[in-house]
Amino acid sequence: MTLRDAAPAQATRAGTGRALVASGVTIGYDVLGPSDGAPVLLVHGHPFNRSMWTPQAAALAGAGYRVIAPDLRGYGDSVVVPGRTLLSDFAQDLAGLLDHLGVPRAVVAGLSMGGQIAMHFHLRHPDRITALVLADTSPIAETDEGKALRNALADRLLAEGMDGYAAEVIDKMIAPHHVTGLPEVAEHVLGMMRGTDPAGAAAALRGRAERPDYRDTLRAVRVPTLLVVGADDPYTPVDQAELMHALVPGATLALIDDAAHLPNLEQPQRFNAVLLDFLRAHRY
């Protein structure tokens, strides 16, 4: 399923494609909304794909924004590059995709690993960001224990595949009562995880283990910034969002009740309202 499937046809013009970007990687992507709309780049988390943003893409496109939703390398329709994929590699791919689409600057929104990629994009390309949206993410570098755990998980995924891991983490990605209470959301999340190539997921895990600390990067942010977090997120709890809120000058912090790590899918109407209110407040 592409994001285009969820967009109101009368309100948007959409395209789906694959682009060979300057880094030599082929990226799958969707573009929705009017061509003259303010660009919004949506960066998905691990181990998902661009359909993670379906509710937001439809709402943004319907509100007149030009939505760009790529699959990161190793995920969805993008090429799988085995080994190790650093956050800097993902950021370089995204810059290349914006170049391919003729987009000099955009609102950059990322969730979880996508938020860390957005922070790295800001580190390397601050002049290409008009606003930042960081959801359910953390700016802190990985600990030695965390590095070992991520590399061990990478080994496991290569050996066993994605199914067992997906079953273990579904009630952390979304709140446990949503696994049964929101069956369509649970199946969507499970489908994304199960459908991810283990080699792509493992490469991202190994690269993410080496991520730098982004706290100084956040102190240097000078564009409007929205921080969003699910109130019950076990991976990047509320205190991580509060830390970022203290670091980014003038940032807005929004807490989404009754949601875990994926508030954009668990509470899409609330998430969309927060996102659109933020963009409108800053005249995007």
Image (cartoon, rainbow, N blue to C red):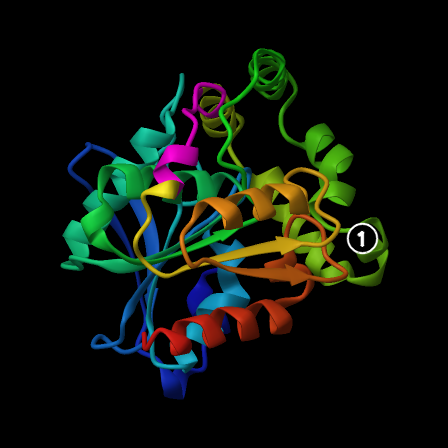
Name the residue type under label 1. Val
Give the extent of the magenta segment.
207-218
Residue at 33 percent across and 75 percent down: it is: 33
- The foreground one among 132 and 199 is 132
Q: Is residue 271 left or right of residue 132?
A: right
On the image, which quarter does residue 251 sit in? Answer: bottom left
In this figure, what is the number of numbered marks? 1
Residue at 26 percent across and 76 percent down: it is: 37
In the image, residue 27 above or below residue 284: above
Residue at 25 percent across and 34 percent down: it is: 25
- Mark 1 closeness class: few <14, some 14–19, many ≥20 residues within 10 Å: many
Tell me where residue 219 appears, x and y as whole percent.
38, 42
SS for dot 1: helix
**Which residue bears the numbered disc 1?**
179
On the image, which quarter does residue 17 sit in? Answer: bottom left
Inspect the magenta stretch and tell me whether residue 157 lies in it.
no
Tell me where residue 207 appears, x and y as whole percent.
43, 22
Residue 72: tell me if it is visible: no
Tell me where residue 94 appears, x and y as whole percent.
28, 44
Q: Is residue 209 left or right of residue 182?
A: left
